[in-house]
Amino acid sequence: MLKRQWIVGLAALALLVCGKANAASVHQFHGGVTLVGEITVGDFIKVKRALNGARKKTLFLNSAGGLVSEALLIGNWLRDSGFETRLDRNSRCASACVLIFAGGIIRTAHPSSTIIVHMGSGLFNEEAINDFKNVYEEYGPAGSAILASIAEQRAALITLKQVSFLLKSGVSINFLDIASSVHHLDGKELTRRQALKLNLINAD
């Protein structure tokens, strides 16, 4: 009974989180492009299109996070394209947003902005929900071990992708030490001194 409750509870939490997802708002303005809101599937295409058409190649971020996979797509493309990222006055960049920020060749942040990190999670997405559903339908409560194995594999793949990306971006690998110590439903605000020491912010 306990195993069944664990599986159903995990799937319900995943559905709850994913059900709230709304694509970020991406707009051009005279200083570059803004990305505001939750990062989800399709935002990479919107950011790419907007920045390619912008006169100034700077991406301003204000987001509480979202899909790590989409954030890595955006971050890697920003890096390969040589674009800048910036956190403007009173903006907030949390979770997956920090990976996008790390993709900028030049990364600046207003002193009033906040950077919040936590452990990455690959559980809360459509693919994971389908995995939960399929495993439970086929194996019932006995499928809890399979779900645990799936979760472990996803966590390992996400970590590997983030390590590769951070090395490419010049951000200290110690970033993951800090982020992985915080549960993905919580968050830790980095001080400006920490962000500079990690080379997350690399310009004033």
Image (spheres, rainbow, N blue to C red):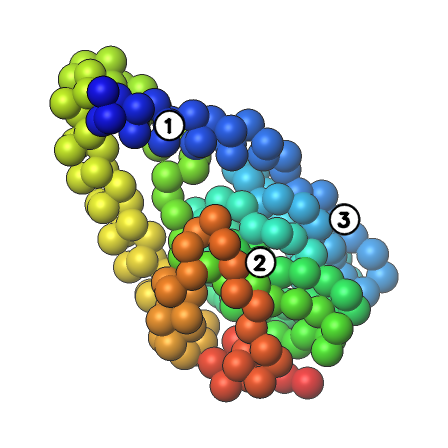
Estimate the x, y position of residue 124 in percent, counting from the top left.
43, 37
Please provide percent x and percent y for residue 196. 55, 84
Q: Quadrant of residue 13?
A: top left
Instruction: For marks 1 and 3, give the one nearer the viewer.
Output: 1
Distance from label 2 to label 3 (Cα)? 20 Å
Q: Residue pushed farthest top? A: 137
Q: Residue at x 48, y 49 (%)?
A: 185
Q: Which residue is mark 2?
A: 94
Residue type, mark 3 in image: His
The residue under the point 37% across, 44% down is: 122
Q: Nearer the viewer, mark 2 or mark 3?
A: 2
Sequence-earlier tag: 2 or 1: 1
- The answer to which image quadrant residue 62 occupies is bottom right
Residue 195 at x, y percent in the picture:
55, 78
**Nearer to me, 59 or 189:** 189
User: Marks 1 and 3, how far apart in space?
Assistant: 37 Å
- Asked if residue 42 is positioned above or below residue 135 in the image, the reply reads below
- Tell me if residue 202 can be seen: no
Q: Which residue is mark 1?
A: 9
Answer yes or no: do the residues labelled 2 and 1 have beta carbons within 8 Å? Answer: no
- The crowding category of the residue bearing disc 1, from other C-alpha atoms within 10 Å (few below 14, some 14 to 19, many at least 20), is few
**Residue kind at label 1, given as amino acid type:** Gly
Residue with the mark numbered 3: 27
Residue 30, visible in the rendered structure: yes
